[in-house]
């Protein structure tokens, strides 16, 4: 997850970090983008595949940066779990089809 966050949001997170600390770091970066560059924020949210509907529901709230940070965190976690599940269910290649 941290590679995606580093690439998209410029966050360099330590190897060992708690969920709350990740969200706090995200919220700080998102707050900066909300104040100065919302277009960039929306582009990043699109690339991170954060639900536009969920984003629009929280964007005007007083603690929007924190809520958006949670949306990002939850989406990244969802994608990670999906990839792990896909790896676990992926079949070994058919030995008869090997060359």
Image (cartoon, grey):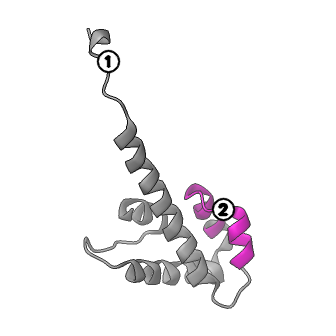
* Spot occupied by residue 59 in the image (x, y as percentages of width and height): 70, 78
Note whether 24 is above or below 7 in the view shown.
Answer: below
79 displayed left or right of 96: right
Q: Quadrant of residue 1?
A: bottom left
Q: Which mark is residue 94?
A: 1
Magenta-span inclusion, residue 90: no
Magenta stretch bounds: 41-58
The answer to which of 33 and 2 lies nearer the viewer is: 2
Number of the front mark, 1 or 2? 1
Note whether 2 is above or below 85 in the view shown.
Answer: below
Q: Where is mark 2, residue-wise? A: 51
Mark 1 or 2, nearer chain start: 2
Dots 1, 2 in contact, CB < 8 A: no
Q: Quadrant of residue 40?
A: bottom right
Q: Which mark is residue 59?
A: none
Extreme-bottom residue of the structure: 62
* Spot occupied by residue 28 in the image (x, y as percentages of width and height): 50, 84
The answer to which of 20 and 4 lies nearer the viewer is: 20
Report the label total: 2
Check the picture and name the quadrant holding the C terminus. top left
Q: Is disc 1 placed on a helix, strand or loop? A: loop
Q: Main secondary structure of the magenta part?
A: helix
Question: Marks 1 and 2, Cα distance to the nearest angstrom?
Answer: 38 Å
What's the residue at 48%, 68% (across, down)? 9
What's the residue at 53%, 63% (across, down)? 75
Q: Quadrant of residue 44?
A: bottom right
* Spot occupied by residue 67 in the image (x, y as percentages of width and height): 60, 80
* Spot occupied by residue 26 in the image (x, y as percentages of width and height): 48, 77
What's the residue at 42%, 56% (across, down)? 80
Please rate how many residues cluster around mark 1, counting C-alpha atoms within 10 Å: few if below 14, some from 14 to 19, many from 20.
few
């Amino acid at each position: 997850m941290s590679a995606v966050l580093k690439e998209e949001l410029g966050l360099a997170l330590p190897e060992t970090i708690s969920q709350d600390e990740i969200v706090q770091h995200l919220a700080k970066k998102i707050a900066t983008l909300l104040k100065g560059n919302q277009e960039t924020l929306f582009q990043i949210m699109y690339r991170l595949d954060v639900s536009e509907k969920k984003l629009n529901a929280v964007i005007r709230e007083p603690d929007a940066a924190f809520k958006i940070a949670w949306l990002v965190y939850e989406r990244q976690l969802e994608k990670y779990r999906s990839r792990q599940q896909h790896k676990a269910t992926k079949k070994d290649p058919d030995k008869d089809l090997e060359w």
